[in-house]
Amino acid sequence: MHPIVFSIGPINITLLGVFSVLGILVALRVARAEARRKMLDEATFQNGILLVLVAGLVGSRLFYAAVFDPETFFAQPMRVFALHEGGLSIQGGLLGGVLAGLLYFRGDRGSFLRAGDAVVPAVILAQAIARIGCDVFGVPADPALPWAVAVGEESLHPVQIYESMLNYLLFVGLWSIRDRTSRDGELFFLYIAAFGLNRFVVEFFRTNPEAIGGLTVAHVTSVAMIGAASAGLFALRRFARPGSSGEVPVTSRSNRRAALGVAGLMIASVVTYYGIYGYLIHL
C-alpha cells in the first residue's frame, strides 16, 4: 500500500513524501549549522546540497529500477518517472548523492571530504525521520512479538522502526565525535560504514531479491559500502596528514541538547508510527 495523506489535483501526497520532506527540512537546518561551524562557504555549500538532493532522488529511483524490478522497467521504461507508484532505494540515493558531491565539491568549491563531514550527521537524521513514512513492512514475526504490526492476518516486523532507531543512534554517535576526528573525511567514511552495517542488520527482517548464499541484494550492497568505507578510512590514515582547517569548537552543552532532541524524536517517531499505521491498517 502507498498511504495517501492528501491530494492536489491529480498529484497524491503520500506518507513517505510527507516524512521525507520533514526529514529534509530538519536536515537542512542541521547541515547549515555544521557548515557554519566548519567555516565552509555558505552559498557554495547550499548549492551543493541542492544538487546532491536531486542526484540522490534520481539515483534512488534508477537503482531501484535496475536492481529490484528490472523486468517491469525494461518492459515499460517510462514508468521510471512514476514516483507516485513508489520504489526508491536509499542505497542508490546515497550513491547518486556521493557522485554528485564528488563532481561539485572540487577545485575552488572546496573539499568534498570536508563538506561530507559537515553533511553526514544531517543525512542520517533525515533518513531516521523519513523511514517512519515507509510503507514496506518486514517478514512475519514468528512467534508474534509485542511490537509487531498486524497487517491483515499476519504479524509483521516493523522494520521501519528498527532502521529508524538505529539511524537515530548513529546520528548521536556521529554528532558526538564530529570534532574529534583528525582528518577531513573520517566522519564521512564512518557514516558510510555504520549505515551499511545498520542496513545489513535490518535486511534480515525484510523481503528483497536474493543475491547469493541466502543474502539479499541489499545485504551485498551493504557489505560493499562497509568495504569501500573501510578502505577509505585506511587510505586517509595512511596517506593524509592529520589536521584540518579551522572550525568552531563544539560545546558539551550543544551535544547534550542534541541528545535530548534526538530522544524526543525517537519517542515521537515510535508513537507516530504505531498511531498512523494502526489507523491505516484498520480502516
Image (cartoon, helix red, strand yellow):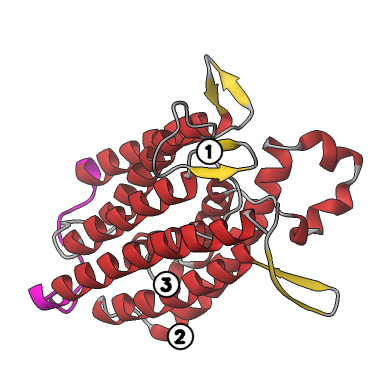
Q: CA distance from mark 1 to mark 2?
A: 45 Å
Say which element carries label 2.
Answer: helix
Nearest to the eye among marks 3 and 2: give it: 3
Q: CA distance from mark 3 to mark 2?
A: 17 Å
Query: Circle 2 is placed at which residue position?
Result: 43
Q: Is residue 9 left or right of residue 278?
A: right
Instruction: Residue type at mark 3: give it.
Output: Ala
- Residue at 53% across / 17% down in the picture? 214
Say which element carries label 3.
Answer: helix
Query: Circle 1 is placed at which residue position?
Result: 156
- Residue at 16% across / 71% down in the picture? 255
Q: CA distance from mark 3 to mark 1?
A: 30 Å
**Which segment is the magenta one?**
238-254
Residue 82 lies, in percent from the top left, at: 80, 58
Main SS of residues in magenta: loop
For the residue pair 244 and 196, the one nearer the viewer reads as 196
Residue 162 lies, in percent from the top left, at: 40, 46
Residue lying furthest top = 213
- Picture quarter with the C terminus: bottom right
For the residue pair 145 and 36, the one nearer the viewer reads as 145
Residue 125 lies, in percent from the top left, at: 38, 63
Nearest to the eye among marks 1 and 2: give it: 1
Nearest to the eye among marks 3 and 1: give it: 1
Say which element carries label 1.
Answer: strand
Q: Which mark is residue 235?
A: none
- Residue at 68% across / 52% down in the picture? 61
Density class for disc 3 (Cα within 10 Å; few <14, some 14-19, many ≥20) is many
Residue 238 sits in quarter = top left
Q: Is residue 243 magenta?
A: yes
Q: Is residue 231 visible?
A: yes
Density class for disc 2 (Cα within 10 Å; few <14, some 14-19, many ≥20) is few
Query: Circle 3 is placed at which residue position?
Result: 27
